[in-house]
Amino acid sequence: MAGTFDKRYGSELLKNPIYMSGLIVVVISLGLVTAKGGLVSGIGILAMPFLISYLYIVFMMPKVGIIAIYLLNFTAIGLSRYLQGVPFGLSIDGNFLLIYAALFFSNFFKKVPWKNAKNDLVLLSVIWYGYALFQLVNPEAISRVAWFYAMRGVALYMLFTLPLIFILFNTKKDLDQFLKIWAIMSILGTLKGIMQKFMGVDAWEQAWLDAGSASTHLLFGKLRVFSFYSDAGQFGAAQGHVGVVFMILGLSEKRSKKLKIFYFITAILGLYGLMISGTRGAMAVPVMGFAMYIILKKNIKIMVLGGLMGVAVLVFFKYTTIGQSNYSIARMRTAFNPTEDASYQVRRANQRKLSAYMASRPFGGGIGSAGNWGLRFTPHTFLANTPTDSWYVMIWAEQGVIGLALHLFILLYILFKSMYLILFKVKDKEINAIMCALASGYFGIMVASYGNGVLGQMPTGIMIYSSMAFLFLGPKLEKDKLKVQDEIGNELKQN
């Protein structure tokens, strides 16, 4: 009988013809697939063991899938510039489906708290997605393929994200993890933007500019920084969002000194990222976001200080020429004089044309009929060739006045209920401060979406939908915290 020392390991296995033959078959197969399908196919095969391991981990710990979604949410578009042909965007959809599948099968072994998703916020997301489904039978819609791609950012990610937060990612620890991932990825985004500004773009980014994006990202010989985001508009709005949320978190009383410093650094880098993006419409994010924070705090001193700061910013940009030699400042300044801006006049003209076209189309032209998806799938149509330039104008063009009214109702309902919870329900200072930050950032993005189509794009869309869920979870988080404090107090009494 062969002993333990007779077993073969590693390279010794290759002395066996069976193992050697198997290795040769694998190498030849990999070579053929790579030769026929390209480098991406070969990388796909090499990645299979890692993908299988990842599937196993997500089924065992579904929260890992949520973290992966947040990471992909920031990096998917940037990666697609380097590995063309790989559907990184669809990988987010795949992760959502994987997490839901993991929850479904785990339900056979332990109870999944599906009832946590039974609330008004999830109901609103179902109604909104139901209207998006209705758009499939809109007689004006031409391309069902365009609908599939466009409806993901418009409605599907909201429908997928909200229940997962309530069911799976609903503790204070989860909220803190969400904020830290958001901060770290945003810092990396600004650092990448700084590299583009001072060191120039790399070969892959230059190829993206040469393919048509230079017309909107190279103005007067100056680069509008886009980092690893979809474009400069999204980068600017997302970084402005970060500046608002993390500046307010940094001002929070109930935080450690190290964490406050980390959040202040995140906020400052975010606001700097907004400036170098050259995105004028994104200025609305910090302006309106901090205005909302002033209202939520109900503090006379903060209101006066905030009002003075607001006036100072207005005077600096609108009534002075200080720093005009700096391109970023000069471009931001044009946002305060929109009537004198040629691009503003073009937008108004486009909206007048759309108004005449939409008068007889209360349900719009169909999801995916306008913007980039329209140019890709139905380039010959009126909507595809009329820039919308705004999230709300895009919703109006694609889903009509009925869709726009429904969408605004949902957004405003979420905003006003969040304000009610902050002002009258949640008393814990730490939880309340986080809710103030999320609500202020949400309002800033809402307002900025009038000038740019940022709300449903990556990464802003999923961060906003997650923020909505955590805002509605505020009372539950406060209750959990009080429960823990009571348990600790009881233990101390017993000891």
Image (cartoon, rainbow, N blue to C red):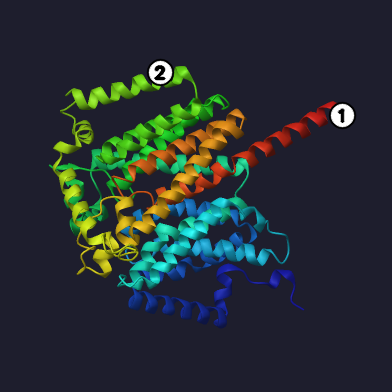
Regarding mark 2 in the picture, which secondary structure is present there? helix
Nearest the viewer among 164 and 155 is 155
- The residue indicated by pointer 1 is 494
Q: Where does the C terminus fall, quadrant-wise?
A: top right
Disc on res. 224: none
The residue at the point 28 percent across, 46 percent down is 232
Q: Is residue 364 visible?
A: yes
Nearest the viewer among 121 and 113 is 121
The amino acid type found where label 1 is placed reads Gln
Nearest the viewer among 493 and 385 is 385
- The residue indicated by pointer 2 is 304
Q: Position of residue 31 (x, y in %)?
A: 38, 76
Regarding mark 1 in the picture, which secondary structure is present there? helix
The residue at the point 39 percent across, 38 percent down is 444
Q: Quadrant of residue 200?
A: top left
- The local crowd at label 1, few if under 14, some if 14 to 19, many if 20 or more residues have their Cα within 10 Å, is few
| 1 vs 2, front mark | 2
Q: Is residue 295 above or below residue 193?
A: above
Q: Is residue 168 visible?
A: no
Q: Is residue 182 above or below residue 401?
A: above
